[in-house]
Structure formats: structure tokens, C-alpha cells
Image (cartoon, grey):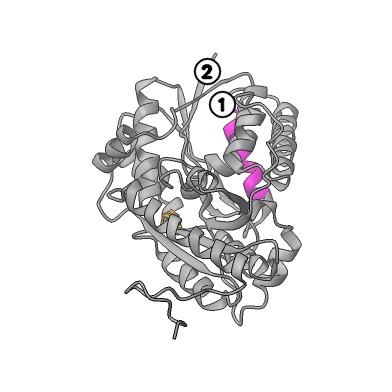
């Protein structure tokens, strides 16, 4: 049985159920790398150029770990566009070439080109070519792909119910038990960022877990209604042409209006072009909620993040209890005291 390796990074957090179902239905065994660890990050740093953002470095760390398992193929799609007239970060385009340059003797890459801004028949032809590696039956390939799409939709239903994408994938994969415990905490924080940074606990420095430990309920972009996100994003004077960036801006504006959300945290990666622009747009547009931008890279430490989150949550609590921010003086005096 052929073994297909799927690195646990980047599109994994969006599309793992699709591709696992597709290859499994075609008779292949799917293997993944282990969850991100410090070793993965270090391996990624050694395998990429300094200019790459942290998620790309981590992805390369996962590819390196997968190679140790000697798969027959590695799935490394070339994402260009996942919806018409909107694009994915150009770093995704170069992934298969960068892998081949780093590991010239790596197993064959399944480098399906995903460009939905072109004719969708092109996408199907690419998927068909990938399927031909495992079967000659066009119908089996078509059925496997359709099955994969259905599984991905099933996972998305869970994310709308409050699971993070990683939790939903683990639930789907039988690695987690549901249902999610109801979060009845006092304050609610909306979190935003690229999914492969935000939902990878090692990249995000356990941001979600830390907020929960600080007594916060956490709201995700994925639990917002898609049409409402698009309607909010459409209020920008110019359409953002990055799919993920546009969704984040739309979700931020939606969260800004939502009375159940007390504050918003945006996780950005140092060296990320889209983040530098999207984070700034959100900071300017969010008018009614406290907003915090956290920028991370491979040198960031958990202690610094925890201190900032504690301060942010303390401020949200004070604001909620007292109805206003009481402007505590750094000298120990109340700013409004006589
Ligand atoms: S969008 Fe930013 S974080 Fe994502 S791959 Fe591109 S540069 Fe890296």
C-alpha cells in the first residue's frame, strides 16, 4: 500500500480531512508528522532561508520529519487561489519548488495546483492526475474527491459550533472526544490570525489555552457566519485580494459589533507581509472593543505573551465590571482621585 505523507502545517489546518479522505478512498495509507515541537521549529529554521515567516519554517520542519518516515509521496499542493478573484499568500506558490530545492532526493511530490481563479476544470484535471497515481478509474477519483469535500464540510460544522479547527480535526480523526465543554466564563475574547499560526499550539505559544486558563471564553473566526463576514469585509473601500486576510478583517468588524465579545486579539507573524497590512487595518477599524496585536517569531517566549494576556484580560474585566476603564496611574494613584 502506497504511503502518502501530509505535513502538519499550513493547509493541514484547513484541508486535512479532504486530502486524508481522498487518498484513503483511493487505497493509500496517509501518514502525518507529529505535532509541532521545538525540534520541528529548529529543523525548519535549518531547512529554510531566514526571510521565511515562522509558519513556512515550521512547515519545512514537518516535511523534514516526514522524510524520516520514508513515505512514497508527499502532498505539497501549490495554492494560488481558493476562490475566484482572490489569492493566497505567494509563499504558498513556491512550496513544492522550495522542497525540491532543499531535498533534491525527496520522494515524488503530489503538487496539485489549486487555482480557483482559473477554469475549475483545471483544478479537476490536477486532482485527476494525482488520483491516477493510485487508480486508473476516473469514477473512483471523482467519488473520492467528492467524499473528501463532504468530510471537510462535516468538520466545518463543528467549527461553527465552537470547536477550534484543530479540535474539530482531532474530533474527526478520532483523536478527541466530544462534545466541547460549554464555556461559561465571564469575559469573551475574539481571536484572529492565520489558522496555521493560531491553531498550532507551538506557533501560537498556546495562546488559546492561556486565554482559557485566564478564565476567558474564546471566539473563533470559524464560528462566525460566512455571509456576515463577507458583508463586513465588503465595507472596506477597496477589496482585499488575500482570501484569509479579507476574512480576518470581516470577522474583526463583526466581532467589533458583537456585544458578547469583550476584546479582540490578533496573532501576527513577524516577516509576514499580509499580517503587517491586515493587522494594521483591523487596529484602525475596530472602534468599540479593546484590541491587542501580538507579533511572534521563532524567538518569542511564552512568559512575555502571558504577561500581555494577563494585563489585557485584567483590563477587560475591570471594564466589564465598572463599565469604564479606570485609568490606574502608573504611580499608584487613581487618575480620577482628588
Ligand atoms: S500569509 Fe504570512 S504567515 Fe502566511 S505564509 Fe504568507 S507570509 Fe507566512
Q: Residue furthest bottom?
A: 338
Q: Secondary structure at mark 2?
A: loop
Residue 209 visible here: yes
Q: Quadrant of residue 329?
A: bottom left
Q: Earlier in the sequence, mark 1 or mark 2?
A: 2
- Looking at the picture, how far across and down is residue 307, in whole percent? 37, 55
Instruction: Quickly name the residue at label 1.
Output: 133
Q: Is residue 131 magenta?
A: yes
Above or below, 79 against 138 in this view is: below
Where residue 2 is drawn, which disc sits there? Answer: 2
Give the quarter of the figure containing the N terminus. Answer: top right
Front position in the image: 179 or 98: 179
- Quadrant of the picture in which ligand 1 is shown: bottom left
Front position in the image: 289 or 156: 289
The stretch in magenta equals: 121-132
Helix, strand or loop for the magenta stretch, by majority: helix
Q: State the residue at coordinates (41%, 68%).
A: 276
Amino acid at each position: 500500500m502506497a504511503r502518502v505523507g501530509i505535513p502538519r502545517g499550513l493547509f493541514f489546518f484547513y484541508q486535512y480531512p479532504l486530502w486524508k479522505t481522498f487518498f484513503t478512498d483511493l487505497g493509500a495509507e496517509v501518514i502525518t508528522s507529529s505535532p509541532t515541537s521545538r525540534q520541528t521549529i529548529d529543523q525548519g529554521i535549518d531547512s529554510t532561508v531566514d526571510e521565511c515567516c515562522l509558519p513556512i519554517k515550521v512547515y519545512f520542519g514537518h516535511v523534514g520529519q516526514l522524510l524520516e518516515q520514508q513515505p512514497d509521496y508527499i502532498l505539497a499542493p501549490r495554492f494560488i487561489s481558493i476562490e475566484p478573484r482572490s489569492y493566497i499568500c505567494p509563499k504558498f506558490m513556491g512550496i513544492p519548488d522550495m522542497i525540491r530545492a532543499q531535498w533534491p532526493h525527496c520522494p515524488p511530490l503530489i503538487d496539485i495546483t489549486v487555482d480557483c481563479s482559473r477554469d475549475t476544470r483545471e483544478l479537476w484535471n490536477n486532482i485527476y492526475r494525482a488520483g491516477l497515481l493510485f487508480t486508473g478509474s476516473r469514477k473512483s477519483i471523482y467519488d473520492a474527491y467528492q467524499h473528501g469535500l463532504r468530510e471537510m464540510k462535516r468538520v466545518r460544522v463543528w467549527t461553527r459550533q465552537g470547536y477550534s479547527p484543530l479540535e474539530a480535526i482531532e474530533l474527526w480523526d478520532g483523536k478527541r472526544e466530544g462534545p466541547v465543554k460549554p464555556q461559561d466564563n465571564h469575559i469573551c475574547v475574539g481571536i484572529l490570525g492565520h489558522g496555521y499560526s493560531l491553531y498550532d499550539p507551538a506557533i501560537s505559544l498556546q495562546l488559546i489555552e492561556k486565554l482559557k486558563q485566564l478564565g476567558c471564553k474564546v471566539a473563533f473566526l470559524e464560528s462566525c457566519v460566512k455571509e456576515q463576514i463577507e458583508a463586513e469585509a465588503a465595507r472596506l473601500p477597496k477589496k482585499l485580494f488575500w482570501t484569509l486576510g479579507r476574512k480576518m478583517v470581516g470577522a474583526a468588524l463583526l466581532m467589533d459589533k458583537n456585544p458578547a465579545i469583550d476584546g479582540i486579539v490578533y496573532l501576527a507573524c513577524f516577516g509576514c507581509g499580509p499580517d503587517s497590512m491586515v493587522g494594521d487595518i483591523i487596529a484602525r477599524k475596530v472602534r468599540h472593543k479593546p484590541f491587542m496585536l501580538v507579533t511572534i517569531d521563532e524567538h518569542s517566549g511564552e512568559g512575555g505573551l502571558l504577561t500581555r494576556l494577563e494585563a489585557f484580560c485584567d483590563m477587560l474585566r475591570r471594564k466589564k465590571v465598572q463599565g469604564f476603564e479606570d485609568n490606574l496611574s502608573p504611580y499608584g494613584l487613581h487618575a480620577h482621585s482628588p
